[in-house]
Structure formats: C-alpha cells, structure tokens
Image: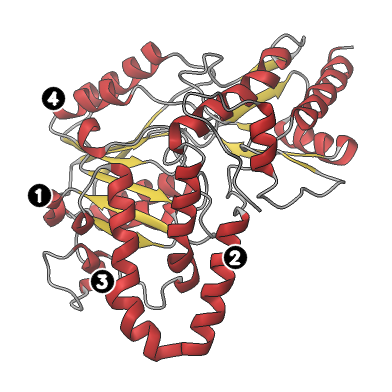
C-alpha cells in the first residue's frame, strides 16, 4: 500500500485523510469508538515493524537483547524522542507509560522537607493526584489541591493557581498538566510556570496528552521535568513512555531505589526497568516515521481540531447538553468532556454505549464525574453524526 501523495502546499482534505485511514485497522461495525485517548491504533507499517520485532526477539533471545538491542536500539529511540521535544538524548529516559514517567518524577523528587507544600489540581490524572497526596505520608509535606471547576477560562485558571501559590506555606513543587486528561483543555502553561518561578517552585509537567497533538518544545517552554507516553498521539505500540529531565536538574531526581547500574549523573539510573518493552522500543521509530509522513504534530492538530469542531459545534446547541471543554479550538484538543442535565455521568456513558453503540469513557474530576469523547485522525463524520444523534435523543428525554 503506497502512502497518499501530497503536493507541496496542497491541503490535507477529507479525501486525503480517507486514504490515510486505510493504513489503520477497520473499526468494528457494532461499536463507534470515541475513546481514543487511552491509546491509539498502530498504523500498518508500525504494526508490521512491531510483529517483526517480536519475532526477531523471540528467535535471537538474550544474545540480541543484552547486545545490539541494549547498545544500539535503546539509544536510537532516545535520540528520536529528544529530537521530537527539542532536548538532548542524555536527557531522555525510556519508561513503560506516561504514568510511570510522572511517578518517577513525583516520588523520586528529593528536594522536599517537612513543612514544604506541593500543589496539584483536581484536573490532573488520578494516579498523579494519588502520588502527590502520597508525598504527604512519606515526606511530611503539605499536599494541596488547586480546585478547578468545569468549564473554566484561562483567566480563572491563572487566578486559582496564583492564589494557591500565594497562600501556600513554603511552596516547593507543582504538578501541572499541559493538556488536562479529563476534558482536554490546554492550560495557560507559560503564565502558570512564570508564577511558579516567582515563588521558587519546581514544575513537573505531565505531557501525556500533549506529545503528538500539540507542540512540545521543552526548551522554548522552559520546562525542567516532563513525562510523556508514545502510544497515545504518536501511534507507537502500547507500553512505552519517556521522561525528560534537564541535565542541570538531574540531581533533583533520586536514583530508582538506589540503582547503581548507571552512574549518578546518568538519567538511566532514575528507573530500573528490568525487562524493557523490547518490541515497542524496536517498532517506535516506525511510528515516528509515520507521524512525520502525515505532516507531524501540525497536521494532526489541524485534523483533530476539525473533527472536534464538527461535533462540538452542534452538540453545544442542544438544550440540556453542557460542554465542559473550551469551545475555542486553540485551547481545546481531541478530548472533550460533556454532561447532560438530569443524567449522572455513569448513566450517560452507559446509555451512549448500550442504546446507541457509542463508546466513551467516564472520568473523575475530584468531586464529580464527566463523560469524555475523544476523536482520532481516522474518526469519520458518520461516527460523529451518530454521537450527536444520540445526544439529541438523550437530552430531549432528560428535559421532558
């Protein structure tokens, strides 16, 4: 199968994206999957590379894994990830997920003392919120939640973070999501990070839902610590992530359980992975190649924004439907949270699935739950029409 040609300056129109969709597995007939935020499908070249990697590793076993793989292939991927986020290869640590990446940064950050304050928000990923609360038990710090209600504007977000930093006693550490996992909102990153610098606060950036669909340039953003995965918006095999630590800040993250396989000044001492995800690491360069052939992050961002607006612009007009993500595509992403008056999030998620065959996901935002729908570059307008039709029925029933 040849890749769809695109002349210089030509638009990536619907016909072009339909050709791209042919590189992905056909969706099942019974279910419309609008939960692409968990992980993305591999394109056929990536799938083929992954299958070949698994076969080759199964044949070659330890001589390959302890030799060429460790000496060469791991560093190849570190170089590719570094180039993608404008970092240096020695600042990249491979992990198995975005969650593991952020847990390395949160639990191994050693610049905390009893009485310090760490900050996080109810819109951060649940496992990260748990880890930030855990710091209170293990480090004797005050773990403080920044309460953000939905929907919420940039100005209000900045005001809430500013107030939390101002009121905190000895603020030291901030967990910050570049793209919030509950509703896909792009936070006003530079403004919040500027506030953090004024208070001497280190920021741990969760970019799990950013890499691949919005710009990530760690140096331009002034980021010292960040966590990523490669299986959401880059299309790598599931089970692969990365940590970025600015070289000058590596001393602030402790070695993993005292690991001494690598020197103290080597980022690889910050996670003793044991058996790595060999097949995923070997196939990931094919995913990065395919990502680039599509036009990279700018092309994906444009496509996802168009699909998002296609359904959100209509659903937002339905009586009783509340959109809990920014309507402005510049602040939103592929992930959209919503609610229907008179229905709990669980009731809404189950009704969409059982009555209309539309698969979404329920997400917790601290004191409440929301329903989230997430498009992929291969999502069709017909699938989104089905979601809007379902919401039209459900909102009408709930308000009568």
What is the C-alpha distance between the residues marked 3 and 1? 21 Å
Q: Residues within 10 Å of mark 4 (few under 14, many from 20)?
A: few
Secondary element at tag 1: helix
Q: Label 2: which residue?
A: 48
Residue 263's spot in the image, x, y percent? 12, 72
Q: Residues within 10 Å of mark 2 (few under 14, many from 20)?
A: few
Residue 204 or residue 149, whichever sits in front = 204
Residue 394 or residue 71, whichever sits in front = 71
Asked if the residue under mark 1 is in contact with the one under mark 4, i.e. CB atoms within 8 Å, the reply is no
Residue 305 or residue 52, whichever sits in front = 52
Residue 221's spot in the image, x, y percent? 24, 31
Q: Label 3: which residue?
A: 257
Q: Earlier in the sequence, mark 2 or mark 4?
A: 2
Per the rendering, the mark at residue 248 is 1
Per the rendering, the mark at residue 198 is 4
What is the C-alpha distance between the residues marked 2 and 4? 49 Å
For the point 36% across and 72% down, which residue is it? 273
Q: Nearer the viewer, mark 2 or mark 4?
A: 2
Residue 373's spot in the image, x, y percent? 66, 33
Asked if the residue under mark 1 is in contact with the one under mark 2, i.e. CB atoms within 8 Å, the reply is no
What is the C-alpha distance between the residues marked 4 and 1? 19 Å
What is the C-alpha distance between the residues marked 2 and 1? 39 Å
Residue 73 lies left or right of residue 151; in this view the side is: left
Q: Residues within 10 Å of mark 1 (few under 14, many from 20)?
A: few
Q: Residues within 10 Å of mark 3 (few under 14, many from 20)?
A: few
Quadrant of image for the C terminus: top right
Residue 35 lies left or right of residue 27; in this view the side is: left
Q: Earlier in the sequence, mark 3 or mark 1?
A: 1
What is the C-alpha distance between the residues marked 3 and 2? 36 Å
Residue 188 lies left or right of residue 372; in this view the side is: left
Q: Is 354 located above or below residue 267 in the figure?
A: above
Secondary element at tag 2: helix
């Amino acid at each position: 199968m040849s890749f769809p040609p695109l002349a210089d300056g030509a638009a990536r129109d619907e016909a072009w994206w339909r050709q791209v969709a042919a590189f992905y597995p056909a969706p099942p007939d019974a279910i419309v999957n609008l939960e692409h935020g968990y992980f993305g499908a591999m394109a056929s070249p990536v799938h083929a590379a992954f299958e070949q990697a698994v076969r080759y590793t199964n044949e070659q076993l330890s001589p390959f894994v302890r030799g060429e793989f460790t000496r060469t292939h791991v560093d190849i991927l570190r170089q590719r990830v570094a180039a993608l986020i404008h970092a240096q290869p020695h600042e990249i640590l491979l992990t198995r997920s975005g969650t593991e990446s952020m847990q390395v940064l949160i639990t191994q950050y050693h610049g905390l003392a009893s009485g310090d304050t760490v900050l996080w928000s109810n819109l951060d990923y649940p496992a990260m919120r748990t880890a930030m609360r855990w710091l209170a038990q293990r480090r004797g710090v005050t773990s403080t939640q920044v309460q953000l209600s939905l929907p919420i504007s940039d100005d209000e977000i900045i005001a809430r973070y500013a107030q939390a930093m101002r009121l905190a006693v000895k603020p030291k550490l901030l967990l910050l999501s570049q793209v919030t996992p509950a509703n896909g909102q792009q936070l006003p990153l530079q403004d919040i990070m500027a506030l953090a610098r004024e208070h001497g606060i280190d920021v741990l950036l969760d970019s799990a839902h950013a890499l691949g669909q919005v710009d990530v340039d760690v140096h331009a953003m002034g980021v010292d610590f960040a966590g990523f995965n490669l299986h959401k918006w880059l299309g790598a095999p599931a089970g692969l992530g990365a940590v970025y630590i600015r070289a000058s800040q590596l001393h602030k993250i402790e070695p993993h359980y005292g690991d001494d396989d690598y020197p103290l000044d080597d980022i690889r001492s910050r996670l003793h992975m044991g058996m790595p995800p060999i097949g995923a690491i070997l196939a990931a360069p094919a995913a990065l190649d395919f990502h680039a052939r599509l036009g990279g992050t700018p092309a994906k961002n444009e496509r996802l924004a168009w699909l998002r607006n296609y359904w959100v612009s209509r659903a937002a007009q339905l009586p009783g439907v509340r959109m809990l993500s920014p309507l402005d595509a510049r602040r939103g992403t592929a992930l959209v949270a919503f609610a229907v008056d008179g229905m709990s999030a669980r009731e809404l998620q189950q009704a969409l699935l059982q009555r209309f065959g539309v698969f979404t996901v329920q997400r917790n935002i601290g004191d409440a739950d929301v329903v989230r729908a997430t498009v992929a570059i291969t999502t069709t307008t017909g699938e989104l029409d089905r979601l809007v039709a379902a919401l039209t029925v459900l909102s009408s029933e709930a308000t009568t």
